[in-house]
Amino acid sequence: MHVFTLTNEATDHVWVGTCREGVSPEARFKQLQKALPLGIDHPFYRELKVFGPDVYSTELFAVVEDRQELAEMVEEALDTYNGKSLVGITTVLPGTTKSSLAPKAKSKPRTSAAKVTAISGAQSRTTKPVKEKLASGRTGSAARERAIKAGIEAEKAAMAAAKAKKIQEEADEMKAILAGLDARGSTLSRR
């Protein structure tokens, strides 16, 4: 499952959506575009009508394994971009059935039972090559990513503290040198 963002370049509005494994964010955006003429009442569709699809840029935010992680990453994306949610947005009119959406099948001529058995036997012997799934975008759990971010922030804070300490030590050393020079100068003038 994927979490993606659609950014309206004209208004800088960010919409956060999800799509199933095997469906790219671009393909999901095309599904949303195809549903525009249906007249579904949703703020995203109203914005899409006004600005058109060309002002939107799609970006993969995260790749997740389960629904809990999906919900966490959607929340993180919404918080990160101060976005609006596309989760649950429909691409069909309410009341439309799956059978009405299915492509109309052409009637096929009847074949004998022997032909059907021969055809199905031949099909069962052929196997499709299995494609290796490659991760794209961010992978892993949200908790792991938060831990990494916290570690990075702690490291930055430690480096900033070390830098401040070094600056303070240099300032103290400079004060000691100047105080020594002042003390020397005052004793020289008395001689």
Image (spheres, rainbow, N blue to C red):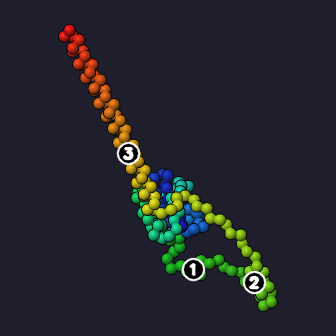
User: Does residue 20 lie above or below 180 as drawn?
Assistant: below
Residue 170: quadrant of the picture: top left
What SS does tag 3 mark?
Answer: helix
Q: Is residue 182 above or below residue 36?
A: above
Q: Mark 1, mark 2: which one is toward the viewer?
A: 2
- Residue of label 2: 120
Q: Quadrant of the N terminus?
A: bottom right
Q: Amino acid at mark 2?
A: Ser
Q: How many marks?
A: 3
Q: Position of residue 18 (x, y in %)?
A: 51, 66
Q: Is residue 43 visible?
A: no
Q: Classify mark 1: helix, strand or loop.
A: helix
**Residue holding disc 3:** 158
Indicate left or right for 77 with 130 as reference.
Answer: left
Spot occupied by residue 82 in the image (x, y as percentages of width and height): 41, 57
Q: Residue at x 52, y 58 (%)?
A: 138
Q: Which residue is mark 1?
A: 98
Tag 3–tag 1 contact (CB < 8 Å): no
Q: Position of residue 84 (x, y in %)?
A: 43, 61
Q: Amino acid at mark 3?
A: Ala
- Quadrant position of residue 27: bottom right
**Which residue is located at x 59 percent, y 66 percent?**
23
